[in-house]
Image: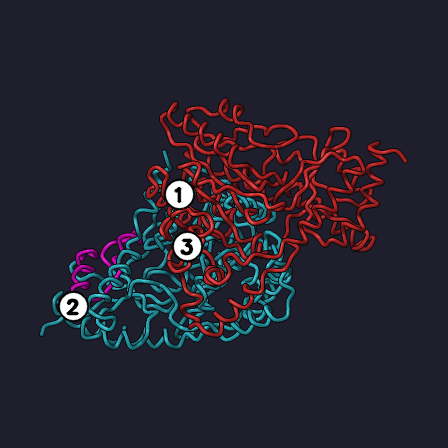
Chain colours: A red, B cyan
Amino acid sequence: MINERMRALGAARSEIRELFEYAKARKAEIGEENVFDFSLGNPSVPCPDEVGASMTALLTECDSIDLHGYTSAQGDATVRAAIANHIKRTHGFDVSGDNLYMTVGAAAALTCSLTALVCPGEEVILLAPYFPEYRVFAERCGGVVREVKCTPDSFLPDISAIEAAINEKTAAIIVNSPNNPTGAVYSEEILSALSKVLKKSEEKYSRSIYLLADEPYRELVYDGVDVPYIPKLYHNTVVCYSYSKSLSIPGERIGYCLVSPRAKNAVDIYYAICGAGRALGFVCAPSLLQKILPSCIGKNSDIRVYDQNRQLLLTNLQEYGYEIVYPQGAFYLFVKAPGGDARVFSEMAKRHELMLVPSDSFGYRGYVRISYCVKTEQIKRALPAFRNLALEAGLIKR
Amino acid sequence: MINERMRALGAARSEIRELFEYAKARKAEIGEENVFDFSLGNPSVPCPDEVGASMTALLTECDSIDLHGYTSAQGDATVRAAIANHIKRTHGFDVSGDNLYMTVGAAAALTCSLTALVCPGEEVILLAPYFPEYRVFAERCGGVVREVKCTPDSFLPDISAIEAAINEKTAAIIVNSPNNPTGAVYSEEILSALSKVLKKSEEKYSRSIYLLADEPYRELVYDGVDVPYIPKLYHNTVVCYSYSKSLSIPGERIGYCLVSPRAKNAVDIYYAICGAGRALGFVCAPSLLQKILPSCIGKNSDIRVYDQNRQLLLTNLQEYGYEIVYPQGAFYLFVKAPGGDARVFSEMAKRHELMLVPSDSFGYRGYVRISYCVKTEQIKRALPAFRNLALEAGLIKR
């Protein structure tokens, strides 16, 4: 009598969560230091001091009725103006607070955007491998997922494959750069090529095709690589942003949708996102979390630990014979599963107490994802296990 | 090309919000003290000291990675255990943390429950007058709303009308006591009668009918009236609770779903709610807000001001000839519109600078709602305007 689709979604843990729970149980059995959990994308560096300082200041200085009261549904106007200014300063892209809709994190930004922009039966393009929840979000609002595989080895959008996948039902494409799970960062060149194909397709099918730019990892990049600002390259863009990773506050759920002012019917898109937020039950993003943002925007967590972890893993794993997609962003390594079956390899890794997520639920086979948002110490202790796994998998000889 | 239903929802402000915005503009014109805004249900008493104290303590004492990190999707286990204990102590009803799913407020609790329990095309019974967003929530997940009018004058559930409205497609009924907009509190007698009819109908149609108890106003009651605990009276109950009103923190968005352990297939219902939360993009309820609850549950805001406001309005408005539903809970008065047309009367009130919400969008005609969660001072200043309005409406003679 209940909604069976929802029951199944709730009963089936994601493959990521499943592995995390196994690691927890295993730690209780053989000791925390002997289990090497690389399953979850949970930030492992503290939030910048400004987060706590700003909360304390607000709690001390503000009237509690104002501080904890409802903000307007789209978010506090002062907060939205501060974010708009930061976008202008950082990206040289002119937006106002009226283009911003505050959300409880990037997941909510995506569900609000998809609910607003996708009509039942329309298609949503996902670039495989992709964050598994994209499929859940798109299907919940009646969308049909069309997977397009990224180019092998470099894991960049395959522009001609995307063009071939677009049809008269294509409503949206989700672009996630820096990417989960590959760590790839898309260049301006590739994004311009994507923009060109999307515009051409809009004309061909006389319809709008929305690019949803899921950007929780925007600030987590290495080697000084540039993350192009997609609204400058493609008009019909909605940026889905979260402070979860940049401020290391993933449990607090704060982010936004930015409807590009260059989008066709930008005001109607914005209204539709407001309507979706209302219908999904969001009311407003958490008030205190909104109000710390003017003091915290741009004060990012110190990501040097992630970079150190990345290099430590890259150097050693390559030495052990693993094939790795070279990652310039986020905090994931995407590693080829020797033998080709990711689930078999993940099980083999478990016997070495290494928790590596098989890529299958990301819509792609034959890889495992390593989340390196962990203490560097854990990586150092895990290296012998990675070596033994390489030996067992036949990547190197004893 | 966008979802037109969502655009319309976002573009059309609710009648409540429309009036609030008019009041704001009017205040700028003629001075704050000359406009009497009774439109919004925004708590006007401060939160208990424990809220700020507990936040400050957590910020000082906890590791920021733990404090602001993801909790499990259903909420922190310690927090859920504390709430379960409070329910046991307060209502003598045995639940565990595993029956609780933390949400970003009661609205999210309702959208998660409806998404979990209503299949497209099934019916949801709303007892008119009702909070207008119920319709938005029910229709968004494909439900069909069936309105059943409350009894005239007392505004209690009309049990035989409910029985007549139930059919083989009835999936759920939303019960809201203390009630928005009438302030009515349903007695154990009436709720038992409702339970009896629901059970009988479940047998008749061989299906489950879920009672969603929307209880943000549970602690806001006067005259020492009792608010029966519905899970004790009806098995298939999901309580949708929010701390917005009891702790005066409506902007912070924290609440829960309680799936009664007595519900048929309680575990499947719980899974379906988890699945709905996942598909709607909630991830987890805000972490800091969850973690203050063990120190704050039961430490409610001081509602004596609301009671004082209630009595001041009741006494005077009745003297001026207004007919009022006697309210024992929440912070609303439901007043009969002289002449019978609520919108006409609301416009007349606006000319006296009184902002009274017409009942039409609550699925009921001929009344206005007065939100008395305001400073008592505002009520005192508004009394002459209420008197002049009564004169103009012919309720009293000069």
A211 to the left or right of A267: right
Q: Amino acid at mark 1?
A: Ser
B38 to the left or right of A52: left
Verify whether residue A225 appears in magenta: no
* Disc 1 from disc 2: Cα separation: 47 Å
Quadrant showing the C terminus of chain B? bottom left
Numbered disc in front, either 1 or 2: 1
In the rendered structure, the residue with mark 3 lies on which chain? A
Q: Which residue is mark 2?
A: B389
Q: Which residue is mark 3?
A: A85
Verify whether residue B358 appears in magenta: yes
Secondary structure of the residue carrying numbered label 2: helix
Residue B293 tag number: none
- Are both tags, 1 and 2, on one chain? no
Q: Are marks 1 and 2 in contact (CB under 8 Å)?
A: no
* Disc 3 from disc 2: Cα separation: 47 Å
Quadrant showing the N terminus of chain B? top left
In the rendered structure, the residue with mark 1 lies on which chain? A
Q: Which residue is mark 1?
A: A260
Front position in the image: A159 or B75: A159
Q: Amino acid at mark 3?
A: Asn
Numbered disc in front, either 1 or 3: 3
Residue B249, image x, y percentages: 45, 66
Secondary structure of the residue carrying numbered label 1: loop
Secondary structure of the residue carrying numbered label 3: helix
Q: Most extreme residue toward the left, as rendered?
A: B398
Front position in the image: A326 or B56: A326
Q: Amino acid at mark 2?
A: Leu
- The structure residue drawn at horizontal position 42% and vertical position 25%, both measured from the top left corner, is A201
Residue B269, image x, y percentages: 56, 47
Residue B320, image x, y percentages: 18, 73
Q: Earlier in the sequence, mark 1 or mark 3?
A: 3
